[in-house]
Image: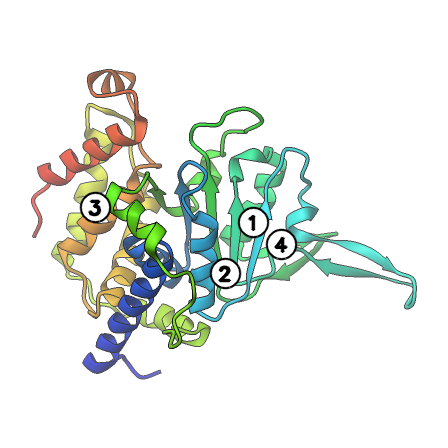
Amino acid sequence: MAKLTHGDLKKVRDSIESISDEIEARVVGSKEIVKFMFISLISNNHILMEGVPGLAKTMLASEFASHIKGEFKRIQFTPDMLPSDITGNIIFNLESRKLEFREGPAFTNVLLADEINRTPAKVQSALLEAMEEKQVSVGGVTHKLPVPFIVIATQNPIEQEGTFPIAEALMDRFLFRLILTYPSRDAEVKILNRALRAPKNQTYLEVESILDLRNQAYDVFVAQSVKEYMVDLMRKTRESQKVYVGASPRTTSKLLMASKACALVHGRNYVIPEDISYISKYLLNHRLILRPEAMLDESDIGTDVAFKVIEEILSEVPAP
């Protein structure tokens, strides 16, 4: 496999910029979110979007799938779901008189897990296997999922009736947790004025290109000083007086691959410290367990406090 040339890298960056602009035209305020989606997809990870209803999270996931020409499926999670509602189940075919496996919605390229915190732990565990192993097990038989496979999950942070806490193991499988907020006044006016028709000439970064970028990501150069910077950042989260449980070594490995994917998204075959600072806030905010006194010192909104703590840590560790 030939390495990407400077022209190839520029083409990748321009394609992602064009896709971000096209989705932004339909989903106002989504441009940076789309870039994080591509970073997650290229690094073979998943993403969690948190926000109140009505912020176009479903539409955003659907638009993203269409621009990679990938298959898109949506699961509306409810408390009465079963694992088979995700993985599929075994049915008896009356014509062939045999048991057959019928695929569930997990067999897709882009899976929207809507309101993921509405399903109990038993169902979450089925999704965990799909996210981590890229496979599902039904009736003692393992079935591989399509490649690529990305879960874009959503949760409502304000509604607690009929919800279940997301297991820490499952939460850790999300590379990023993005916090979606209400748009500004100008952005909301722009929403009313936008044309909902898809543009005539759409930009695509097809599945084959994504798989090629995944392979190329392993060859993205990371200087030793930058690797040490990553380690120092992660170790600083464990030493902070405001953090009860810091980032694990697995988080450090995820940061490395995410930074390589981030470099590709921005048209480079090498990682710079700015890549790390660009993604750290959204990579760490759901992995750090803060001390109670940190919450008392700042505000009642946990994510705001987490962002401030992460920014403090970034400011305390000198970049190479």
- The residue identified by callout 2 is 149
Whether tag 1 and tag 4 are in contact, CB under 8 A, the answer is: yes
* Badge 3 amino acid: Val
Vertical position of residue 278 compared to residue 147: above or below: above
- Foreground label between 1 and 2: 2
What is the CA distance from the residue labelled 1 to the residue labelled 3?
Answer: 28 Å
Marks 1/4: CA–CA distance? 6 Å
Please say if the residues under marks 1 and 2 sit with CB atoms less than 8 Å apart: no
State if disc 3 and disc 2 touch (CB < 8 Å): no
Classify mark 2: residues with Cα within 10 Å, few (<14), some (14-19) or many (20+). many
Mark 1 or mark 3, which has the lower sequence index?
1
Residue 2 spot, x, y in % from top left:
31, 84
| Three-letter amino acid code of the residue under disc 4 | Val
Q: In terms of secondary structure, where does tag 3 sit? A: helix
Q: CA distance from mark 4 to mark 2?
A: 12 Å
Q: How many marks?
A: 4
**Quick check: 56 above or below 209?**
above
Does residue 199 appear anywhere in the picture?
Answer: yes
Residue 136: image tag: 4
Mark 4 or mark 2: which comes first in sequence? 4
Dot 1: element: helix
Badge 1 amino acid: Glu
Q: Which residue is disc 1 drawn over?
A: 129
Q: Residue at x 62, y 40 (%)?
A: 123
Mark nearer the N terminus (2 vs 3) = 2
Q: Quick one: label 1, few (<14), some, or many (20+) residues within 10 Å? A: some
Q: Quarter-wise, where is residue 315 in the image?
A: top left
Q: Residues within 10 Å of mark 4 (few under 14, many from 20)?
A: many
- Image point (30%, 68%), residue name: 16
Mark on residue 231? 3
Distance between the alpha carbons at the discs numbered 2 and 3: 29 Å
Eye-nearest disc, 2 or 3: 2
